[in-house]
Amino acid sequence: MIRPLLMCVALCAVSATSKPTKKDRVHHEEALSKLDHNDLENFDFDHEAFLGTEQAGAFTELLPEESKRRLGVIVDKIDSDKNGFVTEEELEVWITHVHKKQLYKDEDHEWGDIDKNKDGFISWAEYKDFTNDANAGDDNDTTIARDERRFKFADKNGDMLADKEEYAAFLHPEEFGHMKDIVVQEAMDDMDKDKDGFLSMEEYIADMYTPEAGEEEPDWLDEERKHFTEIRDQNKDGKLDRKEVLDWMVPDEDHSKIEAQHLLHEADANHDGKLTKEEILASYSVFVGSQVTNYGEALHHDEF
């Protein structure tokens, strides 16, 4: 079933009774794995980040030698300049590629329901028909207009046909750099009540909290006002411009880069800042699993 495009506007409980509540408009980049990242227990998070969920599971069924052989094939793909070394940048590109493939795969379950003519694309008309059936209601016209604008923004070539990447950008704008402007615009449409192109303190707070009759103001509002003044309002002019809204709503999170640095640290035996195939295969259990992963041998890092 299609997910609401305003999925970032989640209601988070701040008390045991769920009142009062506030909206969290921050778009966090989706994690590389849903597993906990705890290398003291296992490298399962790293396996999913490096291979993707499905492939990580498949590797656990392999004998160690076959797991290493397949890892070697992957290393050759990662070494894009074919100089015999894998750099942090090449690892980052690979992990980003795997992550994007996972996003596309996650949408496959609904793709067939929307792509009625089975041409391998989702047209705006197909998407509109599907959402009209799924989300009929008084606000449907407004939602459809908003969705159409985002669809057009994600549609790089302007043909109103979304391939897997464009559709993923439509559903997960926080994951694609070219979609950041639409994330900000959608927020401004909702929050900028006087339409002056800025968010005042009052508009910022009003979006998070609307008091009910006789209700005491929650303590967290003081903290939010402090955040607005000391953190969000970077130029201290008493309001948020579009750049400041972007910095608030789409934090500079680069999970692929962090994971690339982590894997490099784990496998870089000679500490030269790059990896040979031999170094990666020697630390294969950090990158991939197998039927008989020697976990203790892989724990070579000093901090543990």
Image: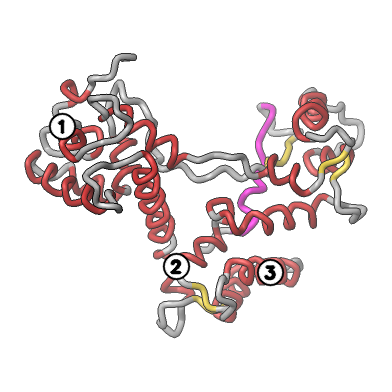
Residue type, numbered disc 2:
Lys
Q: Secondary structure at mark 2?
A: helix
Where is residue 128? Give x, y as percent. Answer: 61, 76
Residue at the extreme front of the image, as rendered: 83
Image side of residue 59 versus residue 31, left or right: left
Sequence-wise, the earlier of marks 1 and 2 is: 2
What stretch of residues is rendered in magenta? 4-15
Q: Quadrant of the C terminus?
A: top left
Residue in the image at 61% along x and 69% along y: 151
The three-letter code of the residue at mark 3 reads Arg
Coloring basis for residues: secondary structure
- Measured in 3D between alpha carbons, the distance from the residue under mark 3 to the one under mark 1, in whole angstroms, is 50 Å
Badge 2: residue crowd in 10 Å (few <14, some 14–19, many ≥20): many
Write down the residue under mark 2: 164
Q: Using the rendered image of the protein, determine whether residue 19 is visible from the camera's viewpoint.
A: yes
Disc 3 designates what residue? Answer: 149
* Residue at the image position 53 percent from the left and 63 percent from the top: 2
Give the tally of numbered discs. Answer: 3
| Mark 1, residue position | 282
Which of the 4 image quarters holds residue 61?
top left
Q: Nearer the viewer, residue 3 or 47?
A: 47
Give the mark, 3 or 1, whose residue is nearer the N terminus: 3
Q: Which mark is residue 262?
A: none
Q: Nearer the viewer, mark 3 or mark 1?
A: 1
Neighbourhood count class around disc 1 (C-alpha, 10 Å): few under 14, some 14–19, many 20 upward:
some
Please say if 30 is above or below 155: above
Which residue, as the protein is rendered here, is positioned at the far bottom?
A: 117
**Residue 132 shown left or right of residue 263 in the figure:** right
